[in-house]
Amino acid sequence: MLTRSTMLLVTALLLAGCGADATPQPAAGDVGPKPGGTLVLGENADEPACLDPHQLSTTNTTVVGRPIFDSLLWQDAEGDLKPWLASAWKVSDDGLTYTFTLRDGVTFHDGSAWNAEALKLNLEHMRDPATKSPLAASYIAPYRDAKVVDEHTLQVRLSSPYSAFLNVLAQSYLAMLSPEQLKEAPASTCEHPVGSGPFVFDKWTKGQSITYRKNPGYTWAPTGRTGPAYLDGLEIRFLAEDATRYNALLAGEVNVIDNTPPASDFTAGRGISHDPAKASTLLDEAGWSAKDKDGIRLKDGKRLTAVAIDTGVNPQNTQILVQAQAAAAKAGIEIRIDNVTAQESQDRTGKGDFDVSVGIWTTNTADVLWIQYSSKNITTPERRGQNTTRLADDDLDKLLEEARARTNAAERAGIYGKAQTRLLELAPAIPLYDRPSLVSAQKRVHGLTWDYAYGAVTFHDAWVS
């Protein structure tokens, strides 16, 4: 078992993520938009195990789910929150009660109506332990209960003030499912989800693709043009290798590719210096002073080994692990990379059965620090949390709880600054670089738009000339 000083060096590597603010523009001269046709997107192999938005947790969550699902609010490029399925909202002075006025005339793909009861059912589904929600349940942890005021008004009560509540309601993880499906066939949400979005789920061939067809009755987009999608259909193909996706784009087999590999040397560390001499001293003091023939440190005859788990579906993650493995070896630390399935990775991560991991986080709220590092978010039998490092620090917990309860933005920012300082002292993770979401498209593809609440390409306005 590794000592505490060693664990601080190798416990976790975190890849901080953010969305790019633009997508490639098509060549000038095309007159449009031109309705019809099917657009094909090449995506990486980080395929979700379930299409229920409240259970999604892969890097492709928004891209896969957003065509089907709408959210309560929309976040624009400036970060401002706009109406979507909610037409208006009020927050009480104490920050504990949110009253949502809901948009009229919205229907789900199965014909069921969008109303206050539908919103209440979705909130209850997110926090239900049976849903096993990896993110939605954490994001709305302060949710207490809701009261239907009338057909299109829902009053939501929180157990404590929660400054990020409106922000997270704009994310695709908290998108809305059909109330009829939630009541009559909740077990079907993974395999055949029913939303209210611009596209209707058609077919999922696991390991290969997901297809969607146009929702002809869609008239409630949040971005200005409210009519149905221009495309008749959308197909997302899972192509594991970066080169395969890129070559498929060049060959015209796909129209758009996501996760275009960026040019980066992964050296842009932030706030944490690298001191090999001090690391060596700490390891010596911890008793790992001897070395074997491979240069790996020994203690009581046991090699200093840290275990990493990797599914192989994200080439960037694999590359970072391989680079970390090489760097650690110079310090006499062996990183053993276990190649596992997505399910095994999920199970072992929940149990803490690993030493090193690589992760990507994209979010629209600083409350992600609570999601990742609060001791309340360590996985338990009742709820799957996102504190994979299993960090438990009383001082950090108090700061994060205080920050999420503050309604004053300046005060909240100051508290988050203190929390970040404490995290640098604890070092549960090493931020490496900002990961842009790079999308490449053929010149004949027009109208690609962006989901700014998470950072992913969307297709309501897309068309192909």
Image: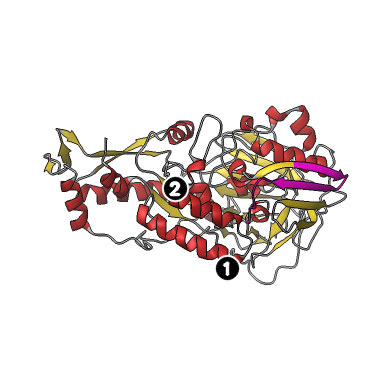
Amino acid at pointer 1: Ala
User: Which quarter of the rendered picture does the C terminus lie within?
Assistant: bottom right
Q: Nearer the viewer, mark 1 or mark 2?
A: 2
Q: Residue under circle 1?
A: 410
SS for callout 2: helix
Amino acid at pointer 2: Asp
Question: What residue is drawn where x is 86% and y is 45%?
Answer: 149
Label 1 crowd (10 A; few <14 / some 14-19 / many >=20): few
Give the vertical position of 207 relative to 153 (above or below): above
Q: Residue under circle 2?
A: 394
Residue 405 magenta: no
Label 2 crowd (10 A; few <14 / some 14-19 / many >=20): few
Asked if marks 1 and 2 touch (Cβ < 8 Å), the reply is no
User: Which quarter of the rendered picture does the N terminus lie within?
Assistant: top left
Q: Position of residue 191 (x, y in %)?
A: 66, 32
The span shown in magenta is 146-163
Q: Is residue 108 visible?
A: no
Q: Position of residue 60 (x, y in %)?
A: 56, 47
Query: On residue 366, which mark appears?
Result: none
